[in-house]
Image (cartoon, helix red, strand yellow):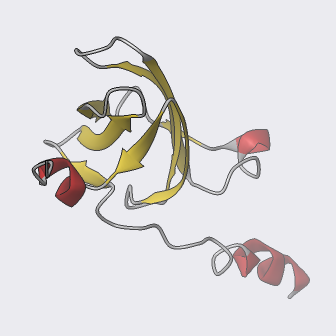
Amino acid sequence: MGFLSKLFSNLGSRSKGEPGYATPDGPHGLRIYVQCDKCGEKVPVRLRTSSEVQKREGPDADQGSGQYFVQKTIVGSKCYQRIEATVEFDARYNVVESTVKGGKLITLKEFNKEDEL
């Protein structure tokens, strides 16, 4: 019984991701949205789930809060500032945790919202 309890103990400890920060884009695609700290440009980023998004397996399985992760350098078209993003996803590709240097992760709703002057 000890083996089974260890095996299934991690199922309840995974935190649930937040929907809205990542949206599906085709059968093997995913979109996230970032906003530049310098110029305020909103940049859509398409990720390929078949090659860019990595699954945590083996010895790396406990090194992050998500089941999947991606590290990406993003450059917009206005100011060309580098935005370094590390995003962790759950099994349904909802964002669990993110670190963004030079910008911030925004939701699809925030991306579509017109800037008020």
Q: In the rendered image, is residue 49 in sight? A: no
- Which residue is at 15% across, 48% downward? 115
User: Residue 32 vs residue 115: left or right?
Assistant: right
User: Residue 23 vs residue 36: left or right?
Assistant: left
Q: 110 or 6, which is in the foreground?
A: 110
The x and y percentages for residue 96 are 52, 60
In the image, farthest residue toward the front: 117
User: Residue 76 vs residue 16: left or right?
Assistant: left
- Which residue is at 20% across, 48% downward? 111
In the image, farthest residue toward the top: 80
The x and y percentages for residue 69 are 53, 41
How many marks can you see? Answer: 0
**Residue 93 picture quarter:** bottom left
Measured along the vertical axis of the image, is residue 105 above or below residue 82?
below
- Which residue is at 18% across, 59% downward? 109
Quarter the N terminus occupies: bottom right
Measured along the vertical axis of the image, is residue 95 above or below residue 84?
below
The x and y percentages for residue 55 are 54, 42
- Which residue is at 64% across, 81% downward? 12
In the image, farthest residue toward the bottom: 1
The x and y percentages for residue 18 are 41, 67
Q: In the rendered image, is residue 101 in sight? A: yes
Q: 95 or 116, which is in the foreground?
A: 116
User: Residue 106 vs residue 84: left or right?
Assistant: left
Measured along the vertical axis of the image, is residue 71 above or below residue 79?
below
